[in-house]
Amino acid sequence: YLYGSMLLGALIGAIFQTPLTTIVGGFSGAFIVWIWLQGQRERYQEKIEAQTEQMIQTVAIVYGLNRNLAQALEEAYRDADEPLKGMLGRFVQEYRAGRPLKECLEEMEKQLPVACFKMFSSVLQVVERSGGDAAETMKNVADIVNKNRFLRQELKSELASVKQENRINVALGLLILIIFRFMITDQYMMLANNILGQILIGGMLTYMVYSIYQVNKLTRI
């Protein structure tokens, strides 16, 4: 993917017939691959967050019915999908084998860097130390997680339109450059044969790619 994208970027840069745009195109291709990998990581994080939120809801509901944490965790394990299912399966197995809850939670926190699970883990540890019925506390945590999830979904839908507008603007900018290159060839070549013109064209291409990164960064939740 990396070398292919760099080659494609360099070929696109070569269309503009300047050494600078060819170099910029190659680096832009590599940069776009990096942006794509960042997007993949963000989608994985979103998936694991959604699974964790559902797990907390299940544990809170089942624990509220039977006051048995192990059974509640097993029920959440049966309902879970990968990749959370594997992590939760090891957690339940070790907890059932007699490993202290605190150690199980701390180990899972390392594998599951999700804010809502850290909050849930802290509540479970406090309840274990103090004793008593944790059903109401778990319900409150689950309610908070649920409200945060809906707020985040609303925000994501609004930010998605911002990303879409950026993609359209980048596509239009590239289209204008291509039209300028092939439809107004004489004026374009006068610009391309000038070092300042090459810097201008290369800078425009660089700005288009960099704007994608900036928008992704600013719209990240």
Image (cartoon, helix red, strand yellow):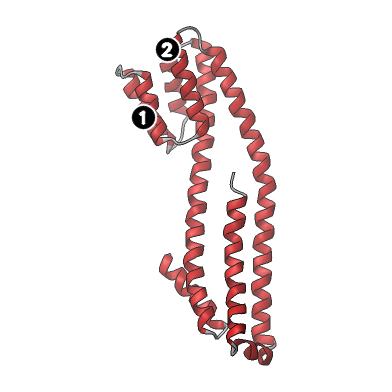
Other residues around mark 1 within 10 Å, as few (<14) / some (14–19) / many (≥20): few
Sequence-first tag of 1 and 2: 1
Where is residue 109? Give x, y as percent: 41, 31
Left or right: residue 33 versus residue 199 is left
24 on left or right of 109 = right
**Mark drawn on residue 129:** 2
**Residue placed most toward the observer, 101 or 8:** 101
What percent of the width, then of the height, locates residue 135?
Answer: 53, 13
Image quadrant in which the C terminus is located: top right
User: Is the residue under label 2 in contact with that under label 1 (CB below 8 Å)?
Assistant: no
Residue that appears at 50% across and 83% down: 19
The residue closer to the viewer here, 90 or 74, is 90
- Please tell me whether residue 141 is drawn above or below residue 187 in the rendered image: above
> Could you tell me how far apart the alpha carbons at marks 1 and 2 are, in whole angstroms?
18 Å
Q: Mark 1 points at which residue?
A: 107
Q: Which amino acid does label 1 sit on?
A: Glu
Residue 76 vs 171, above or below: the answer is above
Q: Residue at x 43, y 27 (%)?
A: 77
Q: Which residue is drawn at 55% across and 15% down?
A: 137
Q: How many labels does the image show?
A: 2
